[in-house]
Image (cartoon, grey):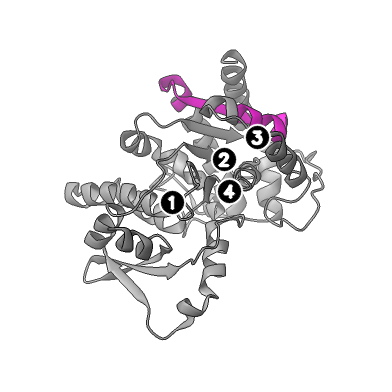
């Protein structure tokens, strides 16, 4: 058993291929390297440069093997899921959590997104298999690779707010954290550098609950994101109304304060050394860790976001009342 665990713990699924309707997972060796990049895509890119992953022969496993794999490793169960509306500090929070070698911090894992999308299938068999695979994959990504890991934080993709019910069904007692920000600032940031959440061919309207409801102009990236952001805000309000285990965090509170609230909410105690690391990390850009962070001007005015501002204010009222 120990030999099997040792062989499995330093491998992770990289991508999903489909062969005759069967899911095949291409895997990468990650050696003893930590998951420290801003996004898991960046971490995978780092792993691809390892000698073992550059060889001619590659590692592929089927869905059944993924479930068996998950049953033969020591893993850390999720400490919390971090939901967000994008451009609201969630990447920096994820990066900050990863500064502690006892924490595993996963940031937007592509394979988890692919499987989560299958959990809303109308085919009950597909749905059931996807739910089992999702839980198995979380165990694999949360494997104890050095033996000191004891907490696992999973930062979702922003559109996973729309999958809240599926995730709550899979993890009924795991704390959920939701991060958000003033709509004008979020829109302005996405306008400067568009994320894939703005692209309807990558995140289709049905994920945002808007299938068959959009016109061609709505699919223009800037317009499409405003529609998505409205759906995110509505989802947050619904979640807060029906959920006891949720922590709402506003970007405006500042990263050190947000980290302190996360610690209190998840029952953690941060050492003075770790808090110093968080403070130092917060001075640099979340997505470009070597670049000093300079707050961008968010004074841009948008004439068509009245509904977004009203929804944002509703969320703020909920957060302030729950203090």
Residue 100 position by quadrant: top right
Mark before the other along the chain sequence, 1 or 4? 4
- At label 1, counting other C-alpha atoms closer than 10 Å, the crowd grade (few under 14, some 14-19, many 20 or more) is many
Pointer 1: what residue? 144
Residue 292, given in percent of the width and then of the height, sits at: 81, 52
Mark number, residue 181: 3
Residue sitting nearer the eye, 317 or 246: 246
Comparing labels 2 and 1, the label whose residue is closer to the camera = 1
Instruction: Tell whether label 3 touches label 2 (CB within 8 Å).
Output: yes
What residue lies at 66% left-to-right and 34% top-to-bottom? 271
Mark before the other along the chain sequence, 3 or 1? 1
Identify the secondary structure beneath mark 3.
Answer: loop
Identify the secondary structure beneath mark 4.
Answer: loop
What residue lies at 45% left-to-right and 24% top-to-bottom? 245
The residue at the far left in this view is 125
- Looking at the figure, which quarter contains the C terminus? top right
Question: Magenta segment, which residues?
Answer: 239-261
């Amino acid at each position: 058993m120990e030999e099997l665990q040792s062989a499995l713990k330093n491998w992770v699924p990289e991508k999903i291929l489909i062969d005759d309707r069967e899911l095949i997972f291409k895997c990468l060796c990650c050696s003893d390297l930590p998951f420290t990049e801003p996004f898991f895509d960046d971490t995978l890119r780092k792993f691809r440069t390892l000698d073992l992953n550059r060889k001619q022969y590659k590692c592929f496993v089927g869905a059944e093997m993924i479930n068996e794999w998950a049953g033969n490793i020591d893993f850390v169960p999720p400490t919390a899921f971090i939901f967000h509306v994008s451009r609201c500090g969630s990447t920096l929070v994820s990066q900050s959590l990863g500064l502690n070698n006892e924490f595993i911090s996963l940031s937007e894992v592509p394979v988890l997104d692919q499987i989560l999308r299958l959990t809303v299938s109308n085919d009950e068999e597909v749905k059931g298999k996807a739910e089992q695979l999702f839980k198995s994959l979380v165990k694999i990504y949360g494997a104890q690779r050095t033996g000191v890991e004891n907490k696992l934080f999973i930062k979702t993709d922003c559109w996973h707010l729309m999958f809240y019910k599926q995730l709550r069904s899979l993890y009924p007692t795991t704390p959920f954290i939701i991060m958000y920000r003033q709509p004008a600032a979020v829109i302005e940031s996405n306008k400067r550098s568009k994320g894939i959440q703005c692209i309807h061919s990558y995140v289709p309207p049905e994920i945002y609950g808007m299938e068959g409801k959009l016109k061609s102009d709505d699919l223009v990236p800037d317009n499409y994101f405003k529609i998505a952001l409205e759906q995110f805000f509505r989802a947050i309000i619904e979640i807060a109304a029906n959920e006891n285990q949720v922590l709402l965090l506003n970007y405006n509170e500042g990263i050190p304060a947000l980290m302190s609230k996360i610690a209190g909410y998840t029952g953690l105690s941060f050492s003075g050394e770790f808090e110093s690391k968080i403070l130092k990390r917060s001075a640099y850009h979340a997505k470009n860790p070597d670049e000093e962070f300079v707050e961008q001007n968010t004074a841009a005015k948008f004439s068509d976001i009245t509904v977004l501002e009203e929804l944002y204010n509703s969320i703020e009222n909920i957060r302030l009342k729950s203090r």
